[in-house]
Image: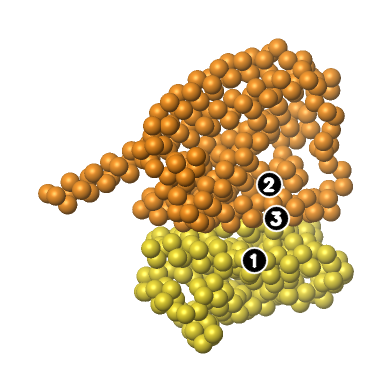
Chain colours: A orange, B yellow
Amino acid sequence: MIAGMANPQRFLEFSGWALPVAGVAALALFAVGLPWGLHYSPPDYQQGEMVRVMYVHVPAAWWSMGIYAFMAGASFVSLVWRHALADVAARAAAPIGATYAALCLATGSLWGAPTWGTWWVWDARLTSMLVLFLTYLGYLALTFAIEDAERGARIAGVLCLAGAVNLPIVHFSVEWWSTLHQPSSFIRSGGSALHPAMLGPLMTMAGAYAAAFAALLFANMRAEIFRRRALAAQRARARAA
Amino acid sequence: MIAVLALFRRDLAIAWGAGAGPAAPIGFFLGTVALVPLTMDAQRASLLESLRNVGIPVIWIAAALAAFMILERLFQADLEEGGLEQMLLSPAPLEALVLAKALALWIAVGLPLAAAAAPAAIMLQIPAASAPLVSIAVAVGMLAFIGAGLVGAAAAAGIKRAGVLIALVSAPFFAPPALFGAAACEAAAQGLGLGTPAFQLLCGIAVLAAALGPIAAAAALRLQAE
């Protein structure tokens, strides 16, 4: 499957039907998950209606981390096997992951203000998500700055893998530091198990975010393949002229 | 081995002798530190106490900013003037050559800057007895900063005016050393010395950065040369 996708033509054929399938799945899951989570699910006995932010926030947090893991895997495949489309996939995933991370930070802040009484705390999870967002921004800025897009994506792949080593170190560093400085945390780790009535909409939304990621990833990758082809055709015509 | 030593000596000479040498980053470091009291209210009776509270964070922020600056030129000249091709042709592994460059930069600029951290600490009202300990911690921290910044410096080497980009790319990698470094200095200022877990973790991060940074930077430099 991964090796087969190294052929851009085969990927274009695959994504030609996979992109609309993922797009329709994302729209359908959002159409079910958003009303279910934001209206029909039960309010929390402690947080009341505020708990509904969870259905937007938690899937964004999960998938912003999942997308970075996907990028690190794709970068590894690109560097080790020189897979033709792996660096395209990593580069195409980055803006989606950055958007999910920004959405997670923004909704988390909006959730924290009424429930914790503060917009922001410097605990391990929030700081790690902020550092993840900055890592995305650094990766994107690097790919924008390098003129040759193909070389830029491969060099940024090295940075992506280094970031994958760095992020757990940051997480455990901040955990150590915040337990040293902040004896009482606002966040209960784990907390009470989620009620099944909340699990349904949460999982639907997680599926919607995943399908949206797949659709946007395929669209970004197709655009990049066509861009590279157009560039190659321009060069060929300039050489012929 | 001869190639590694030769590159180490060459980079040491460049970092120490070319331009203003370590004077420019040290001047930048002290200038940044000196701006902090000026942004505070001089009339307030508690100015010195406020300085004491922010002193150690300010020293670490200024040291991190100075590290961003010195990283910008680390690979730029090698890429422009063909030094990188020579490094790739050399029988010595590229990782060892990058480590030699990083250590040369640390010795020529990082250690003098760490020495300048002691007077800066005293000016920021940190107890004078612990100022040498702050210097030692900043010396270890500069090794961690340089090691952690290598991959960003190598990845951005081909780009004109890459300074801000290197800072953005390297900032996530600077978080652990900055955190442990400041915690180690805070403990030292409270009279706990340098035997604290924070200082030990700072040393561990520095060793990790100096070990893994050259591997990642060498991978990026090989792609730069393609």
- The quadrant in which residue A85 appears is top left
Q: Specify the subunit that label 3 lies on.
A: A
Residue under disc 3 on the same chain as residue under disc 2: yes
Residue receiving disc 1: B209
For this rendering, which residue is in front, B30 or A146?
Answer: A146
Element class at badge 1? helix
Residue A118 x, y percent position in the rendering: 75, 35
- The quadrant in which residue B139 appears is bottom right
Callout 2, which amino acid?
Answer: Ser
| Labels 3 and 2 touching (C-beta < 8 A) | no
Residue receiving disc 3: A169
Q: Choose mark 3 or mark 2, whichever is in front.
A: 3
Residue B226 x, y percent position in the rendering: 38, 63
Direction top: furthest residue: A40
Residue receiving disc 2: A128
Residue under disc 3 on the same chain as residue under disc 1: no
Q: Is residue A29 above or below residue B137?
A: above
Q: Is residue B105 visible?
A: no
Callout 1, which amino acid?
Answer: Ala
Callout 3, which amino acid?
Answer: Ile
Element class at badge 3? helix
Upstream in sequence: badge 3 or badge 2: 2
Residue A177 x, y percent position in the rendering: 79, 54
For this rendering, which residue is in front, B210 or B52?
Answer: B210
Element class at badge 2? helix
Direction left: furthest residue: A241
Q: Is residue B61 above or below residue A88?
A: below
Q: CA distance from mark 3 to mark 2?
A: 10 Å
